[in-house]
Amino acid sequence: MQHFIQTANHFGKNRIPFFFLIDFEQKKPLIYPLDQAISEGVWFDFGKIVNKPALPTTSKTFELATLPINFQQYQSAFELVQKEIQAGNSYLLNLTVPTEINTNYQLDEIYLSSQAKYKSRLKDQFVCFSPECFIRIQQNKIYSYPMKGTINANENNAKEKLINSPKEFTEHNTIVDLIRNDLALVAKYIQVTKYRYIDKVETHRGSIYQTSSEICGELDENWQNNVGTILSTLLPAGSISGAPKLKTVEIIQQAEQQERGYYTGIFGYFDGENLDSAVAIRYIEQQGNKLIFRSGGGITALSQLNEEYNEILEKVYVPISTL
């Protein structure tokens, strides 16, 4: 990670545009000058800036079948987390699980056909179609948009249920407080500029609602000289780890019993002046001949086992409009 920090700081100081990808454990970060990323097997799409070969999208009807983790396996991990919460070692932990999927699309076809705020693909390894910003830096201001709270939009009074849920309210506030404290490590004048607004996300199965907040701070002039240090200081992303962060990450390792790799890491780009980045959620990875979809949800003392299990299944979706 130290090499990544030094390289990013060098690129930032010299205003050299670059792409970066950092895994959750921070063991195998990647950084490439922006114009070299595609030759390294990296595709990305941030709306304003896109890097992919000119390939046609498929006209096949998208099909997806899931083989979820069984309930007893999830229950075992959930109960371990609840035990740690009751002991006071964590008060919010994002528990994630793998779901094997079968689909008639290849990873590259999923990438090309899916719609998302942020997309990335690493050749023969993963595709990610993330709705969640990690940090955005523009005109010396740093923004973060933690996303916590999800519900099926087809439920009766779905928005009201989401906004009025005590569990979702507590979870969201915990993450907003954590991100405020994180940003205070690198910036000043921290403010919550938008609070618990709702986004609608379209999936191959229908729509879901998610709540987010916007938190903003002010960076020093020439922050670009320390862009690698800033990124490192803020990792791992609070919304997909928990609080307190250090101890909660230890509990995650016990509960999940496997490394996350690039899943729930971050990816983004620096254009020479500004930066945009995403949390690597909504993520499908290649494991031999299998495709694995990773999903998770925040666990608090108010969490109910059945609801949390259903949430991780609800998040196994691909944002492709062709049904």
Image: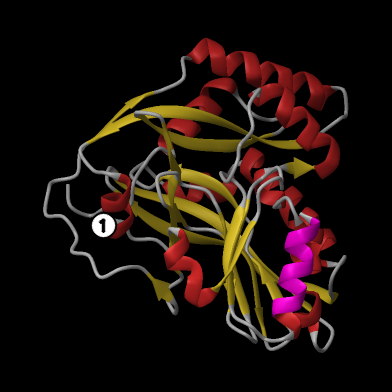
Comparing 4 with 61, the one in front is 4
Against 16, is 242 above or below?
above
The prevailing secondary structure element of the residues shown in magenta is helix
Q: Secondary structure at mark 1?
A: helix
Q: Residue at x 65, y 45 (%)?
A: 240
Residue 150 shows in the view: yes
Please identify the residue farthest to the top as the structure is shown.
72
Q: Residue at x 87, y 22 (%)?
A: 87
Which colour assignment does the render follow? Answer: secondary structure
Q: In the rendering, at what x and y percent does residue 246 appear?
A: 84, 41
Mark 1 surroundings: few (<14), some (14-19) or many (≥20) residues within 10 A: some
Residue 301 shows in the view: no
Comparing 117 with 284, the one in front is 284
Quarter of the image with the N terminus is: bottom right
Q: Amino acid at mark 1?
A: Ser
Q: In the rendering, at what x and y percent does residue 99 appear?
A: 43, 28
Comparing 306 with 33, the one in front is 33
**Residue linked to disc 1:** 113
Q: Is residue 4 magenta?
A: yes
In the displayed structure, does residue 29 sit left or right of residue 36? right
Q: Is residue 268 magenta?
A: no
Against 13, is 182 above or below?
above
**Which image quarter: residue 274?**
bottom right
- The residue stretch that appears in magenta: 2-11
Counting the numbered discs, the total is 1
In the displayed structure, does residue 315 sit left or right of residue 204? right
Comparing 306 with 27, the one in front is 27
In the displayed structure, does residue 76 sit left or right of residue 88? left
Against 299, is 255 above or below?
above
Q: Residue at x 48, y 58 (%)?
A: 131
Q: In the rendering, at what x and y percent does residue 281 appear?
A: 52, 48
Q: In the rendering, at what x and y percent does residue 33 appear?
A: 57, 74
